[in-house]
Amino acid sequence: TIENMVEEVAAELKNSLQREITSDKIGEMVLHKLKDIDHVAYIRFASVYRDFSDADSFVKIISELTEAE
């Protein structure tokens, strides 16, 4: 599943017609796809990517996931 996600992100980037793509854009694309695939992986990636500094950040993102279900 993760390999398919990576292939999807790569294909979207290739088809975007942009010559340069920021790491922020790639990170957001990965976050969006992980959210649909694996909530634990999403939280782990988000904690590093978004640089959570306290427990409240974790609580907030977990609350967002449970509200979306």
Image (cartoon, rainbow, N blue to C red):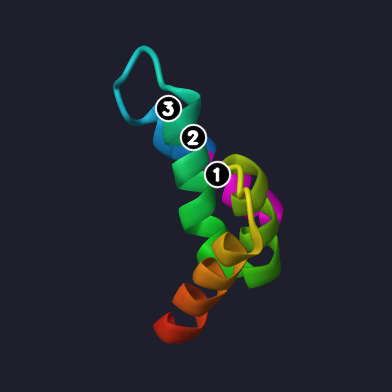
Residue type marked 3: Lys
Q: Which residue is mark 1?
A: 50
Residue type marked 1: Arg
Residue 19 sits in which quadrant? top left
Q: Which region is colored magenta?
A: 1-9
- Relative image position of residue 23 (x, y in whole percent): 50, 26
**Mark 2 residue element:** helix
Q: Quadrant of the C terminus?
A: bottom left
Q: Say which of 15 and 59 sits in front.
A: 59
Q: Which residue is mark 2?
A: 26
N-term-proximal mark, 1 vs 3: 3
- Relative image position of residue 44 (x, y in whole percent): 70, 56
Locate residue 58 relative to residue 21 in the image: left or right. Answer: right
Q: Which residue is mark 3?
A: 14
Residue 51 belongs to the span the image colors magenta: no
Q: Is residue 42 above or below residue 68?
A: above
Dot 2 alpha-carbon crowd within 10 angstroms: few under 14, some 14 to 19, many 20 or more: some
Dot 3 alpha-carbon crowd within 10 angstroms: few under 14, some 14 to 19, many 20 or more: few
- Relative image position of residue 13 (x, y in whole percent): 42, 31
N-term-proximal mark, 2 vs 1: 2
Locate residue 8 relative to residue 53 in the image: left or right. Answer: left
Residue 48 sits in which quadrant? top right
